[in-house]
Image: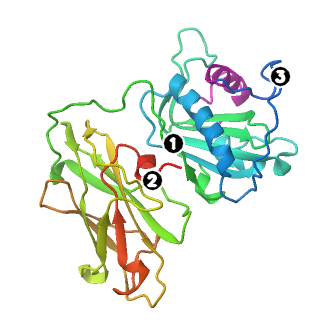
């Protein structure tokens, strides 16, 4: 069990895992006498993308967990294929299991707000809570093996263990944000940009997810496509072509209102093909103009992903842009 939120509850992670898994419809090893699930061959390989046949079952598992334990819709739900040994370093650091190095698993990680109401605890003690929920799932049987809940991100990022698949179409029982028709439009002074979760590319592309956080004391909303400009060293604008409407990786959904209460986060994403010809410049800053506004806000870019400019006749000349979305997973096209 990683993090401080649940370290003091009833000894080890296994006890909490059993309680949580029972509510979510999972069967953890050693938690009861239910029949072992039928083995399903999905050809999972550690360090490789999650096999397509496994995604519906993983989405169903994630959905059951969210319906029972999530307070709001998750910002994102990510899955990687790895070994049990490596998954433990992220989900429950410090735990060891004999033979874990040879067991292939899916590591399911969610960012949101979670309450483990069914966790065993002293009378009158509050239920453990956390922002990051991790579940280790046997890749052959889809049996739950380990569970972690923490207020902090996993010490080992799932993306460092293999290509990340984001599960879409998931929501908590109650809406994460109020559906208010007359929401006041967010203005630049109310928001702050930050880099979103890293993306393991499914194609020869470079993708950047950007967080838009409401840092003000009042709620506001965003609807539509932002205007985006990538600038190079010294602030010079790189003359990319910008395109709306999605592509093979980014969502093509029509824009919808995203309500942002104080502290809430919305997301946008951009991506481009890798340069085929020579690189003529590298973006070091993204400048974003919110939908319906004229004053830009900007974010200095990290070294990765590399967003390089390569001229008008190169496939890497075009930048695809998503509308503002309420969750990081929703900037991607549903698989």
Indicate the position of residue 197 as horizontal and vertical percent values: 47, 54
Residue 236 seen in the figure: yes
* Of callouts 3 and 2, the N-terminal one: 3
Left or right of 52? Residue 294 is left
Which region of the structure is painted magenta?
1-24
Q: Would you identify the image quadrant in which residue 32 lies?
A: top right
Indicate the position of residue 192 as horizontal and vertical percent values: 27, 53
Sort mark 2 into few (<14), some (14-19) or many (20+) by Cα contacts within 10 Å: many
What is the C-alpha distance between the residues marked 1 and 3? 35 Å
Residue that mark 2 sits on: 332
Compared to residue 26, the image places residue 78 above or below, namely: below
Residue at coordinates 30% horizontally, 56% vertically from top-left? 193
Residue at coordinates 75% horizontally, 52% vertically from top-left? 44
Indicate the position of residue 22 as horizontal and vertical percent values: 67, 20
Indicate the position of residue 110 as horizontal and vertical percent values: 53, 40
Compared to residue 124, the image places residue 222 above or below, namely: below
Residue that mark 3 sits on: 35
Foreground tag (1 vs 3): 3
Dots 3 and 2: beta carbons under 8 Å? no
What is the C-alpha distance between the residues marked 3 and 2? 37 Å
Foreground tag (1 vs 2): 2
Q: Nearer the viewer, residue 153 or 168?
A: 168
Residue that mark 1 sits on: 152
What is the C-alpha distance between the residues marked 1 and 2? 25 Å
Residue 216 seen in the figure: no
């Amino acid at each position: 069990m990683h993090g401080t939120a649940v370290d003091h509850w009833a000894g080890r992670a296994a006890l909490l895992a059993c309680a949580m898994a029972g509510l979510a419809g999972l069967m953890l090893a050693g938690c009861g006498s239910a029949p072992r699930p039928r083995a399903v061959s999905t050809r999972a390989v550690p360090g490789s993308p999650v096999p397509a046949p496994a995604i519906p079952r993983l989405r169903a598992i994630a959905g059951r967990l969210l319906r029972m334990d999530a307070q709001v819709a998750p910002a994102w739900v990510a899955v990687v294929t790895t070994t049990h040994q490596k998954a433990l370093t992220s989900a429950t650091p410090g735990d060891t299991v004999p033979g874990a190095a040879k067991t292939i698993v899916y590591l399911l990680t969610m960012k949101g707000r979670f309450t483990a109401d069914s966790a065993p605890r002293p009378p009158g003690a509050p239920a453990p809570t956390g922002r990051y929920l991790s579940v280790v799932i046997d890749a052959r049987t889809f049996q739950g093996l380990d569970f972690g809940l923490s207020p902090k991100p996993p010490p080992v990022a799932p993306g460092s263990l293999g290509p990340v698949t984001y599960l879409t179409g998931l929501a908590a029982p109650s809406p994460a944000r109020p559906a208010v028709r007359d929401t006041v439009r967010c203005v630049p002074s109310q928001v702050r940009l930050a880099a979103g979760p890293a993306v393991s590319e499914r194609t020869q592309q470079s993708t950047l997810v950007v967080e838009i956080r409401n840092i003000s004391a009042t709620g506001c909303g965003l609807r539509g496509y932002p205007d985006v400009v990538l600038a190079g060293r010294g602030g010079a604008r790189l003359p990319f072509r910008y395109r709306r409407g999605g592509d093979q990786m980014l969502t093509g959904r029509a824009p919808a209102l995203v309500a942002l209460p104080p502290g809430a986060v919305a997301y946008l994403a951009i991506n481009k093909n890798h340069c085929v010809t020579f690189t003529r410049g590298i973006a070091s800053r993204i400048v974003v103009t919110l939908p319906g506004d004229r004053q830009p806000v900007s974010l200095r870019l990290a070294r990765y992903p590399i967003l390089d400019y390569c001229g008008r006749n190169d496939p890497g000349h075009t930048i695809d842009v998503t509308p503002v979305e309420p969750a990081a997973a929703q900037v991607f096209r549903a698989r």
